[in-house]
Image (cartoon, rainbow, N blue to C red):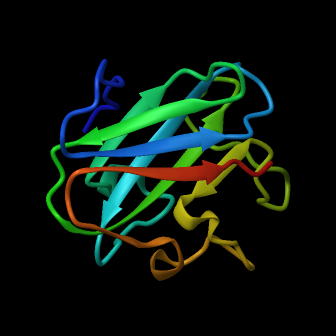
Amino acid sequence: MPWAAPTSAPGPDTIRVEVRDLRSDRGTVYCSIFAAPGEGFPGEAARAAKRIAAKPRNGKALCEFNGLSAGVYAAALIHDENDNQKLDTNWIGLPIEGYGVSRDARAMFGPPPFKDAAFTYGGGSVRVPIHVRY
């Protein structure tokens, strides 16, 4: 599944992932949304229900997911500052580029589990803010 471009206007049923605290406007923000039970969350974007690529602007980005049915979801993102289409890590495997998940779930000795980042979506238009960590 390729990365979709952001839509120009949200529809009536939209999950709006509001990406905050980007340290630069370089590169691309890749957002993925995973449906329960969350298989592949957060690092296997190919297993996500939908994926969006957005360009940062003024330290923020917006990823809008349209057409999702009601259910339990979790969002994950990376800020790929050098546009190599992956999350770069240091020699011990810690991220050196930005990342984040819904509900700002904390990572402890690895990525946070789906249940910590999950939220219930009942339809309509909802905002999901995510603060990026570096």
The single residue placed furthest to the right in the displayed view is: 91
Q: Residue 20 or 3: which is nearer the viewer?
A: 20
- Quadrant position of residue 19: top right
Location of residue 101 by image quarter: bottom right
Percent coordinates x, y for residue 23 in the rendering: 80, 32
Residue in the foreground of this view, choosing between 2 and 53:
53
Image check: 112 left or right of 74?
right
Q: Does 51 sit above or below residue 38?
A: above
State the residue in front, 35 or 88: 35
At 61% from the left edge and 23% from the top edge, which residue is drawn?
56
> At 70% from the left edge and 19% from the top edge, which residue is drawn?
26
Q: How many marks?
A: 0
Q: Quadrant of the N terminus?
A: top left
Q: Position of residue 113 (x, y in %)?
A: 53, 78
Q: Position of residue 14 (x, y in %)?
A: 27, 44
Residue at horizontal 54%, vertical 21%?
55
Q: Nearer the viewer, residue 110 or 26?
A: 26
Compared to residue 55, the image places residue 134 above or below, namely below
Q: Is residue 112 left or right of residue 72?
A: right
